[in-house]
Amino acid sequence: MISPSGRARSVACALLMALLAASSASEAQIPKTVEAPYAAPPDQALLIFSRPRRRQASEVTMHIVNQAGRCIAVLDNGTQMAAPMWPGKHVLMVITGMAPPTVQLMEARLSAGKTYAVELRTRVNAKNPVAIQVLRRADQALEAFPPAIRDQVAAEPDLRRCTEWVSWKRKKIESRALRVKADWDEASDEHRAGRTVRRSDGWTAAEVAGP
């Protein structure tokens, strides 16, 4: 007979495996078919990750990984990167460091044809070294697409190499992601909401292309 704690551990492990090893069609690699910068195609969503430049150069690289264990963006100091994604709900990991890696979670609920933006900032001497801020349409001046994103350098990392690194570090990432997932589930609604991209937070292609 399995004890309650054993059942809870099994469920948590199953959720974690789904987080890191799912291979559903919704998580299939999406080719970058965007013709206009920052404008999402009609059948896809575009999630832009930006990292404002710090005066003091930082050696910490941010890896953004989807629930299939694939890297969708890699950010160094002062860069931004657009990640095409299928519409729907996504749980994402922001991974920093290597020995050991630090894992933080965020959630994205995306609609087709919309562009979303998330700003990631480094934090010094903090348990969570990355401050995650969703740039919401309703919070921007005149609800315009954030102009600062256009001024940052577009990152062009080798995402395949990043995904191979995640696979190589999988055991260490899994152990930390399991604890982080438990903290996420027990956190307040306010905490989770602050790190969740909502469907209404995005801009249409016409709005992104506008002045």
Image (cartoon, helix red, strand yellow):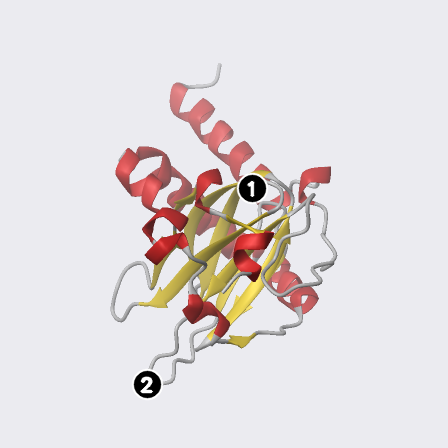
Of the pair 9 and 181, the residue shown nearer to us = 181
Measured along the vertical axis of the image, is residue 115 above or below residue 169? Answer: above
Q: Is mark 2 on a helix, strand or loop?
A: loop
**x and y percent of residue 102 in the render?**
41, 60
- The x, y position of residue 47, in whole percent, is 54, 54
What residue is drawn where x is 32% and y is 58%? 128
The residue sitting at 29% across, 42% down in the picture is: 191
Q: Residue 56 carries which label?
A: 2
Question: Are circles 2 and 1 on residues that touch, CB within 8 Å?
Answer: no
190 left or right, relative to 25: left
Helix, strand or loop for disc 1: helix
Left or right relative to 14: residue 133: left
Task: Please tell me which residue lies in front, 179 or 62.
Answer: 62
| Image location (x, y in percent) of residue 73 | 57, 63
Residue occupied by mark 1: 19
Q: Which amino acid does label 1 sit on?
A: Leu
The residue at the far top in this view is 1
What residue type is disc 2 on? Gln
* Residue furthest out toward the front: 211
User: Going by the image, does 133 lie left or right of 50?
Assistant: left
- Quadrant of residue 201 in the image? top left
Looking at the image, residue 178 sits to the left or right of residue 25; the answer is left
Along the polypeptide, which appears first: circle 2 or circle 1? 1
Residue closer to the observer: 170 or 71:
71
Q: In this view, does 50 lie above or below 104?
A: below
Residue 99 in view of the camera: no
Q: Is residue 155 above or below residue 119?
A: below
Mark nearest the camera among 2 and 1 is 2
